[in-house]
Image: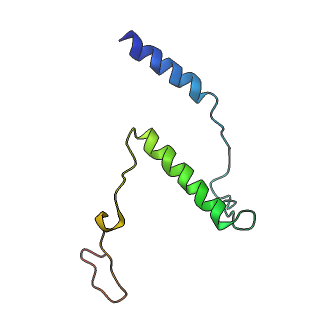
Amino acid sequence: MADNLDERRKRAVGRQRWPVVKAKLDANNDDLSATTTPIERLAMVWSLTQEAWKLARRVIPTYSRHEITARIYRRGDVIPNAS
């Protein structure tokens, strides 16, 4: 139990150093297309993806493209349960 409490305290201390930006909800300043390249924006998304999986304490799935669970709907296809 003490180890668990120590770990919680360490995480709390670590969160105190997180960068925070205060912005109005109606501020529309998230368009980075004028200041970054598509490659840079993809790198940002990948970084966020890795962090999200880490925070969820899950492993990023690795499988080949043909094993991905997905469905392709072409233009004009009827999509089940579409509203």
Residue in the image at 71% along x and 63% along y: 36
In the rendered view, tell whether residue 12 sits above or below residue 3. Answer: below
Residue in the image at 46% along x and 14% along y: 6
Residue in the image at 39% along x and 10% along y: 2
- What is the residue that sits farthest to the front in this orientation? 64
Nearer-the-camera pick, 25 or 65 = 65
Residue in the image at 67% along x and 52% along y: 24
Picture coordinates of residue 65 (x, y %)? 36, 66
- What is the residue that sits farthest to the bottom in this orientation? 76
> Does residue 21 appear left or right of residue 54 in this picture?
right
> Does residue 68 appear left or right of residue 11 in this picture?
left
- What is the residue that sits farthest to the top in this orientation? 2
- Residue 78: name its quadrant: bottom left
> Does residue 19 appear left or right of residue 2 in this picture?
right
Picture coordinates of residue 67 (x, y %)? 29, 64
Picture coordinates of residue 21 (x, y %)? 68, 43
Nearer-the-camera pick, 63 or 16 = 63
